[in-house]
Amino acid sequence: MRKYDIYGMGNALVDIEFKVSDAFLEKHDIEKGFMTLVGEKKQTTLVNEFNGGSEGAKACGGSAANTIIGASYFGAKCFYSCKVADDEFGHFYRDDMAAANVDSNLIGTLPKGVTGKCLVMVSPDAERTMNTHLGISETLSEYELDVDALKNSKYFYAEGYSVTSDSARAAVKKAMEIAKEHGVRTSMTFSDPAIVTYFKDGLNELIGNGVDLLFCNKEEAMVWADTSDFETALSALKSIAKTYVVTLGAEGALIFDGNINFTIDTKSVQAVDTTGAGDLFAGAYLYGITNGLNERESGKLACEAASSVVEKVGPRLPKKQCQSLLYEFERHIVRR
């Protein structure tokens, strides 16, 4: 029996979230709805403009980290490999990860440097725009891999954002190889349309001869397949993934279980903040398929989770809410 359900690897970023106007984004020439890599100086300048320089809500994050923490909140046993510095934000990150009951490589003395931060700007229509300074996370490497923990996991999960760093891309590629050698299933997410647009070759390098499970949204799927036809994109995805999940926003999700495509509807909600919806979706889905649920059931749980998280500000649901959601979901399964 394997010790961990999911082993994740990716950026370690302290998320700092603020509400902004569309005018603010236009003023600073920030492309709405995308993740953009910026220098530390520009990021600090933006933060200082918010609320007279006061700090927004903080949480340890990074796309894959949010997925792993979400899975842990539902009850999955998880490990996360990342890199933070020996500074205030690095110590905050390590403590926050431990509080989420996620094991990690962040033990002992942390390296000198600057911990990465992601400025999450939420506009009135609930769209999220991210300006990210990777800091020391950009030097994530094979050194941060815990091979024993990886070998002892059911699934390996990686974020597409890793392709922006040469050392991180090499580390994820190595982890993919180790996982396949030891019967650990592989999964990853495309992360963002901009990543697919500008780093497609890097993504294909990580995918190699294919992954067991791929997460993406509709736009990312069509950009990757270089088509405006969704059905054509879905057919193309089958060449790189044994199974896949395409999130469709308010329309739910489309899942390929290795044999057939099917859709999962989601409840109608008033979105307040879409930050982290895709990350939590992946976390709930991975929890499901590693803990006795089939693909359809896992998809329904994931849609429930994503619908709930967009009704609040922030990229995560509290652990108690995840547990309550799971309890009601399992009761429904039993009643069927």
Image (cartoon, helix red, strand yellow):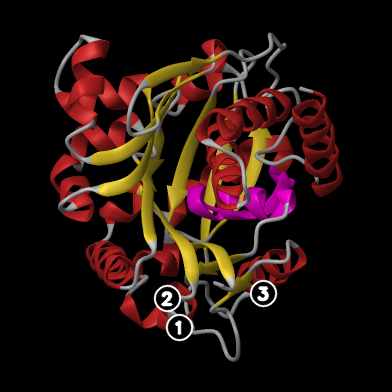
Residue 7 percent coordinates (x, y) = 49, 64
Q: Residue furthest bottom?
A: 108
Which element carries disc 2, helix, strand or loop?
helix
Residue drawn at (61%, 76%) of the image? 87
Q: CA distance from mark 3 to mark 2?
A: 27 Å
Q: Is residue 63 visible in the rendered structure shown here?
A: yes
Residue drawn at (20%, 22%) of the image? 235
* Mark 1 vs 3: CB contact within 8 A: no
Which element carries disc 1, helix, strand or loop?
helix
Residue position for label 1: 148
Residue 318 percent coordinates (x, y) = 80, 44
Q: Earlier in the sequence, mark 3 or mark 2?
A: 3
- Tell me the crowding category of disc 3: few under 14, some 14 to 19, or many 20 or more residues within 10 angstroms, Cα based: some
Q: Relative to residue 135, is residue 20 drawn left or right?
A: right
Residue position for label 3: 91
Query: Image quarter for residue 184?
Result: bottom left
- Tell me the crowding category of disc 2: few under 14, some 14 to 19, or many 20 or more residues within 10 angstroms, Cα based: many
Residue position for label 2: 151
Q: Relative to residue 240, is residue 301 drawn left or right?
A: right
Q: Relative to residue 336, is residue 122 drawn left or right?
A: left
Residue drawn at (49%, 24%) of the image? 25
